Image (cartoon, coloured by chain):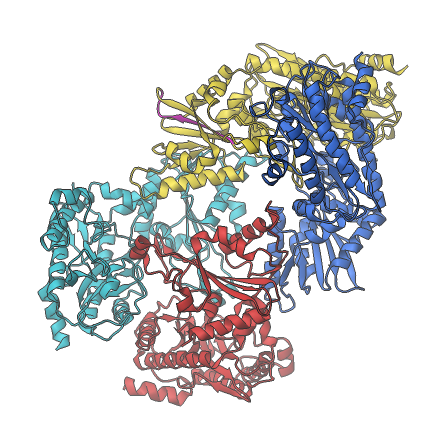
Chain colours: A cyan, B red, C blue, D yellow
Amino acid sequence: MITVEIFQKRRRTLIEHMVSNSAVLIFSAPQVTRSNDTQYPYRQNSNFWYFTGFNEPQSLLLLIKHNEQNQQSVLFNRKRDLMAEIWSGRRLGQEVVSLKLGIERAFPWENINEQLYILLNGLTVLYHAQGENVEADQLVFDTLEKLRNSFNQHIKPINTLTDWRPIVHKMRLFKSKEEIEILRSACRISAQAHIRAMQICRAGMFEYELEREIQYEFNLHGARFPSYNVIIGAGENACILHYVENNSEMRDGDLVLIDAGCEFHGYAADITRTFPINGKFSKPQRILYNIVLNCLYKSLSLFRPGIKINHIHDIVVRTMTLNLLNIGILKGNLETLLSQQAHYPFFMHGLGHWLGLDVHDVGHYGILHRDHILEPGMVLTVEPGLYISSDNTSVPKQYRGIGIRIEDDILITENNNENLTNSVVKDINEIELIMAKTHN
Amino acid sequence: MITVEIFQKRRRTLIEHMVSNSAVLIFSAPQVTRSNDTQYPYRQNSNFWYFTGFNEPQSLLLLIKHNEQNQQSVLFNRKRDLMAEIWSGRRLGQEVVSLKLGIERAFPWENINEQLYILLNGLTVLYHAQGENVEADQLVFDTLEKLRNSFNQHIKPINTLTDWRPIVHKMRLFKSKEEIEILRSACRISAQAHIRAMQICRAGMFEYELEREIQYEFNLHGARFPSYNVIIGAGENACILHYVENNSEMRDGDLVLIDAGCEFHGYAADITRTFPINGKFSKPQRILYNIVLNCLYKSLSLFRPGIKINHIHDIVVRTMTLNLLNIGILKGNLETLLSQQAHYPFFMHGLGHWLGLDVHDVGHYGILHRDHILEPGMVLTVEPGLYISSDNTSVPKQYRGIGIRIEDDILITENNNENLTNSVVKDINEIELIMAKTHN
Amino acid sequence: MITVEIFQKRRRTLIEHMVSNSAVLIFSAPQVTRSNDTQYPYRQNSNFWYFTGFNEPQSLLLLIKHNEQNQQSVLFNRKRDLMAEIWSGRRLGQEVVSLKLGIERAFPWENINEQLYILLNGLTVLYHAQGENVEADQLVFDTLEKLRNSFNQHIKPINTLTDWRPIVHKMRLFKSKEEIEILRSACRISAQAHIRAMQICRAGMFEYELEREIQYEFNLHGARFPSYNVIIGAGENACILHYVENNSEMRDGDLVLIDAGCEFHGYAADITRTFPINGKFSKPQRILYNIVLNCLYKSLSLFRPGIKINHIHDIVVRTMTLNLLNIGILKGNLETLLSQQAHYPFFMHGLGHWLGLDVHDVGHYGILHRDHILEPGMVLTVEPGLYISSDNTSVPKQYRGIGIRIEDDILITENNNENLTNSVVKDINEIELIMAKTHN
Amino acid sequence: MITVEIFQKRRRTLIEHMVSNSAVLIFSAPQVTRSNDTQYPYRQNSNFWYFTGFNEPQSLLLLIKHNEQNQQSVLFNRKRDLMAEIWSGRRLGQEVVSLKLGIERAFPWENINEQLYILLNGLTVLYHAQGENVEADQLVFDTLEKLRNSFNQHIKPINTLTDWRPIVHKMRLFKSKEEIEILRSACRISAQAHIRAMQICRAGMFEYELEREIQYEFNLHGARFPSYNVIIGAGENACILHYVENNSEMRDGDLVLIDAGCEFHGYAADITRTFPINGKFSKPQRILYNIVLNCLYKSLSLFRPGIKINHIHDIVVRTMTLNLLNIGILKGNLETLLSQQAHYPFFMHGLGHWLGLDVHDVGHYGILHRDHILEPGMVLTVEPGLYISSDNTSVPKQYRGIGIRIEDDILITENNNENLTNSVVKDINEIELIMAKTHN
């Protein structure tokens, strides 16, 4: 559980990174329509939630730093409204914000146009994440305009707009012990769901039926939503990385790839397992599976502080290329193949990504961080894969139409890493054993 | 199942309602972000789906009617793209559109700016649903601008923009036998889910756990998604009409209100039941429940062709007001209370709404249609309710904090109505009986 | 003078063209910034002025036609405001609108969001010129949204949006006798300005100095503004069609092209003359000038009801091509040259355009109307030209760097045409004579 | 004349104020429509012109400062295009930019989307004046988005956006000797125009006729445009501060107020004189005029380095209040009247404003600078006024309906000020003398 004190500490840390005479604005997520007048289940913006733990839309967190001594936290949120609450649900309102959220002042969202510029007046730097939310940007620029064009001599413009994402995303990159505890739970629940899927899977079922079992298991442990749309790809569907139709019948003799993780107390797990629908790997499946599995084990042995994801990615690519050469999927000289990125048609994604409040954590910056030197407290996925299109006539026939990915979630520890998803089996014999028990 | 022929027939019907020398534009739904770079499960726009059965985003259906003889159907959709499909899923492309969807021509969505205005050139009326989709509106107005301001003498402006919603929503209002068949299935599946919830419900469980059982049952019958966010309101939570937090513990002695329906082949069911968490109604619960149930039975006996929803609503209000008077929740003269809408604080919503591809069907126009004379083929909900706030000190204490809604879905038949959700019990003794079996 | 009665008559005519149960919206022009906080002189939107004669910004004319008997005219305009008027000028306000403008009702512009949708409620067609004014479009679409999405059962959507430009532009195409009178005055004043320019022109003056004389003469006769930016192109500058820098010294031996017309009571004149800076045409100037002049005379002899501009354009092109062939600028076979549009590098614009409240009258549709059969009451320009670039080495040297355009304004009469700009000389000997008098 | 070297020096000064690793973006002004397809005479954006002297639209100045040693100047401008130039005028193109403007590199405006973000990549601060130009803002934010969301690891986001207006406006506040020379000329020309107006003014003329004379005189000296819309207010029209209708007949016995200044080489003059239409001040006119004139003389005697405009404003207000008390327009105790701002209904504007490229110079910030301590090199207007509404029955009858403003332009010198508009008379006897010569 993330307590009010932890949210407060996060806000203090953000304020420490701000220059004097500045403010930061962090907006809640908008509600989004599913069809006509119905909406998707509301998901709070990860950054907003990280600093507030508050789950209502039409909210804005404003932190003001006059100097090291003088600081203020403010929330704009919806005001109480009897009829609106009967129709659409309870609202916190302003009165209990200080008590419940530890935020010092609260103003009604409905007054934000009149109030925000007054709170910002006199500051010199505004931190805002421009480009994510059209309405938030509009509000910010209208506010800056008000400060700039006022005829009131006491109203002064703010001249600098700075992106808070680099600061906030760096904070989010390092997980506290409370976050690690939640991530551990998210991973454990997700692992159980994968095991349930293995146990229940039968030829003739449809892919979406495994989704049912997975979601059921998630919910049994208190996780109402997956952290991303569940991927259940049987046979060649496994070669589509973000396959979400899940509407094919699962055929005897094929593998099924399940990429699924729950969202637990806001944090994401992300596990992939690939296993035989009928419980027994065929020979070519076994060969390809072991290549991927070895890449995963190799990776897990290498992740530790001081190393870069990309470095391990290169080692995995070398291992994979050598293996593909050995089984005749690639042909030629190893070094030449490596220089040509010959593995790319078969393994076209990164080796892993950050994990946290988002399954692809810490914004759009994640991709850059593959070059980041790992440090304790980071959590990431490790997910080698092999995807052989059935159209690829250059590949020996027995391997075509097979897609395999095996993905674990790890925590970088002081000297090593901890596998958070170890509890879901991945060795061939273990999988076959667990499936045999229910597939007699 | 809605076949290609049925989609074609719908398009023909729409064309019949169009004037000569016109075209209609119906856009697919956009994809929507859940958090960071993840998206909610894609839900096609109901109108677009009604005429195409096609489930991809970035699509546009264009029907051109030159005259009664000369007509054309066109689809803009995403072009095939190997890398994009490996990452994000298969695309139909243009080549098989005619075969799979029965639409005559297909163009890549990527070329829409260059192609659409050429297809529209020379027409005089354009049917478009302005105000629903910012990007669609932008595209339409840019296209009109191109036609208006071209220096090419052969390019002519279109001067009239007409809303197709009144036409399309009227079409959707009357369900065909295929649609009724699907709705029957959606209702049957949803009914089974409600029964499962009754059987499994125990004091001490959390509300969201019943959501798990309901979704599991939906999926067992092939329905992957609910048609709206499931409402599980225990105790006073039932007094919040669209309560979706579902995170309270369910306490012994309270009622729980479940409002849940699945989406099956695109069509929505919408059922509400309210029952005692421990399996036995208390005396005040029983009294209030029977008031609502009587209102529902009364309504069901009245719905038939030739009558208006609002007329029945008035009868229900009279019944309810009389009953509230009898049990002391209202005080005074019946006619005075009726003229003052005294029931409103306890029953503040409409008696029902259209049901179809949307749970609140046929757009924003639904509300107007409560004044519509019912005809065979219409499908609607009937959902009287009573909500007594615990703060309402004017109400006898034993009734406070109780919320009850009972909702069935009906089809208007030739002379009467058919209850599509009859299979889920609603009489007190039936509910207690079914719960007793699993609650021994 | 256009009287209140004439504006009323125009509004009645527009209403006659509207369908029953409709309204038309015509917006005033916005004010536009010149630099920082200064604005360009306000120019009312021509269409708005055509129907109101009202010269304030932030105004909207609304005409409602319930049926042939029941109609209403409404103005939204700025309300009186003492301080604003001290700073920025007088406002009409609402009280005297009926008296001064003959418009039945007036509402403050400041209340338009609350008032407009109420006035439109219940209508079925809205006439609006979408795409000209972002704020007007926003207002219209917000209003349609209000009508569409109201929860009030008495508020009904408007489903059809029709462009009023084809109707209004057709009205404006035919000039009434009052308009013709004003156009006559505008042409007469502009003619006098051209003569003044000829009289004052001397080698060594700068082009902009003739602009001074022209504007002075305009103002002397009550015309404060030109109807378009005055073009004074000496030497090769004449080959730039919309040359407005006007900052070159005028050299002895060169021609100067002046394209200038005043705006008088809202209506435009548009005259071009080309004459020798030193008062005497050189031989090659004379040759080219007479080709253009003959084309003009030929055209003037042909314009009459029943004919199309494009038809005369073709005749002019033939004449011009033949002449260019004769003097060696073109070479080859006449018919081949015609089929190749060989004249185009030397005469690249149309023969004329409509004239009225705008110098390029009646909107963007003008270009289409070159195919329109002429009828009495139309006013247009006739403006053949020849432009020989100095870079064009395929042309005999003596002709290079010469640009000539001669433009008159004509009214199509019952059987013929009337040259409204006849009073400014254009024959070589007349020009030389008039210039000789002041150039001793 | 501002030479290329001066523009270069200005750019260097701006770069000196920038932090390392930053760039500044300064956009040209857009072209603006007057009516239908005609445009107002193009006026370059003052800031863009200040740094480039370049007069084309669709241009962007980009200055990049890597560090103190490594800097770069870049221009985006329209590419050469034969047909476009024949129609709309010559373009500089990219090839001669370095030679003509001293800017190192030039790219076609048409490529800005592909080029700008590459030039900005790797920088950390972007200076931009958000909120002035919708299209410029769009371009800037799209560019930031491109840098932020690129999948290319070598593309890095810019996190800080800073407003360059405070820097640039401070630069523009202090005039160089070349600027002062041009301002001197602008003031001298404008002075001559005011004298011409006095000489020509007669009862029975219309206000706009004096505008003709003023513009004629401007043009005679090479100034094609006024720096703001000429104000000619006869009689009570003088009480409207920005009266621009100029369409009233000037009546014998009334005063006329002329507020007019030319734009010369981009710089503005701003002179106001008020004089009797018939050449002779009446007694009440004389009394009021001398109050204003004394305020002006008093002000002129006070402006010098080290003082604030507001301080002199207070002295003027005291003088004026005392005088109004003396002649019975105000009644009561002087100090009380001062504390009540009793002068405000009669003198409701500031005493002066900065003058330079804009008549209200240096952006929206001007108003704040009235509190600025004056320094040598600043140029400003001094313009006391008195405006007595004819409705104001609390004022002795003879003073009603009179508006007077007298405005000079001054340069703050080392120890004093220099009156740049001294050459246009303002003493009553001088005015009467100059008018008598032409009015006998």
Q: In which quarter of the image is residue C155?
A: bottom right
Q: Give left or right: position of C413 versus A184.
A: right
A180 vs B335, nearest the viewer: A180
The residue sitting at 59% across, 78% down in the picture is: B310
**Residue A250's spot in the image, x, y percent?**
24, 71
D223 vs B82, nearest the viewer: B82
**Residue B30's spot in the image, x, y percent?**
43, 58
**Quarter of the figure with the N terminus of chain D:** top right
**Quarter of the figure with the C terminus of chain D:** top right
C277 vs C230, nearest the viewer: C277
Instruction: Judge whether residue A319 can be spotted in this image.
Output: yes
Magenta: main secondary structure: strand
Task: Using the image, determine if residue A232 lies above or below residue B331.
Answer: above
Which residues fall within the magenta stretch? D59-68
**Residue C31's spot in the image, x, y percent?**
66, 39
Task: Using the image, determine if residue C146 lies above or below residue D233.
Answer: below
Number of numbered discs on residues: 0
Instruction: Judge whether residue C255 can be spotted in this image.
Output: no
Task: Using the image, determine if residue B413 lies above or below residue C301.
Answer: below
